[in-house]
Image (cartoon, rainbow, N blue to C red):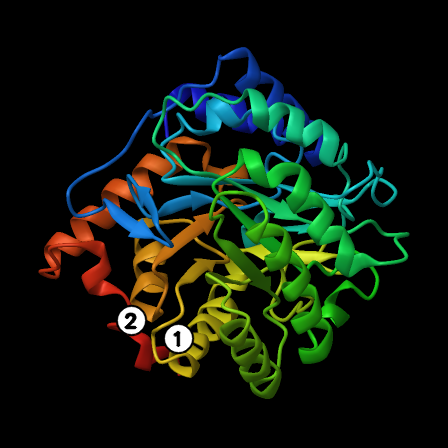
Amino acid sequence: MTLIEKVALKALHQIDPERAHTLAMMAMKMGVVPLSGLVTTPRLETTFCGMTLTNPVGLAAGYDKNAQVVDALTQAGFGFVEVGAVTPRPQPGNPKPRLFRLTEDQAVINRYGFNNEGMEAAAARLTRRSRLRPVPVGVNLGANKDSDDRANDFARVLAACGPHVDFATVNVSSPNTEKLRDLQGAEALSALLAGVIDVRDGLGKYTPIFLKIAPDLTDAELAEIAQVAQEAKIDAIIATNTTLDREGLKSASKDEAGGLSGAPLFEKSTRVLAKLSQMTDGHMPLVGVGGIASAEDAYQKIRAGAHVVQLYSALAYKGMSLVEEIALGLDKLLERDGFDHVADAVGTGREAWL
């Protein structure tokens, strides 16, 4: 972390976290945030769901909900970037305050509730994004809180934004929209995915579809989701979203409602990841996310079964330079253990998490 980053983060941590995030986004848009550019090595370059990545470290959805700073993010060292979640119509989300730092736990609780400017605004910005950098950009598909047909909302957002992105994620795992997680049930999920894939097949280009799941699932529920995803021919599963679990937390805001992310999520999400890898016999491409704050964390996710990883919450504590630090640190860990390529390490430590 640079001295400038340390000073900036210290200042931002003195104010409300949602306002701090808004200011950080403004600084990025103005070009005053130091960015790493493309970060890659022969060991880190990889292919995921048909996309060529300079490295396997991606940005999770939630940071750039409205696709406002996509061009800057593709210069921040990430191998791929996901924006959103985006819903068909604009919505304000839940009442403030709705974002809480848990500094003692290196964690975050949010109950945003899919606040965003809607699919038309996101699509317009995605249309204008630069295509000069080889960093795939995807969109996280969401549903409006007051929608009469939430399953169809995902398909509508894909129809609007799909032509302008490289992948799309079906997000049925946010805990902050009432009953949204009910769509993870086999029958509802199968119908929802069929509708999304029908839209994808009409886009005129192949757009990989990912499914983002919750960490708070029983083994039976997880197996059911894995089966539905395979039958629907989903391209990848993202494991996992935030958790409702509060075990072991120390910070004053630990009992706030919402989804918990950051360091306390690491073990739970990694166990889900390893189980998914086992259930799909390693054949389903997996994205590991939840609690990644170091190269060693990213490496453990990959060895547990992730083909690529995503991070977000740790950026609030360690700044954007963390992206390059993790990617290059991962390269050194792969070299240390004799792996010629990141793909060679996938799943090699899975049994330790089962």
Nearest the viewer among 191 and 138 is: 191
Q: Quadrant of the C terminus?
A: bottom left
Residue labelled with disc 1: 277
Q: Position of residue 90 (x, y in %)?
A: 82, 36
Mark 2 and mark 1 residues within 8 Å of each other at the beta carbon: yes
Give 233 or 106, whichever is nearer the viewer.
233
Q: Quadrant of residue 133?
A: top left
Mark 2 or mark 1: which comes first in sequence?
1
Mark yes or no: residue 30 visible.
yes
Q: Please, what secondary structure does the residue beneath circle 1 have?
A: helix
Split into 4 quadrants, where in the image is the N terminus? Answer: top left
Tag of residue 112: none
Q: Residue at x 77, y 51 (%)?
A: 153
In the image, taking residue 320 as reference, residue 258 lies left or right, namely: right
Tell me: residue 164, above or below residue 148: above
Total residue callouts: 2
Residue that badge 2 annotates: 347
Residue 206 position, x and y percent, is: 47, 48
**Disc 2 element:** loop
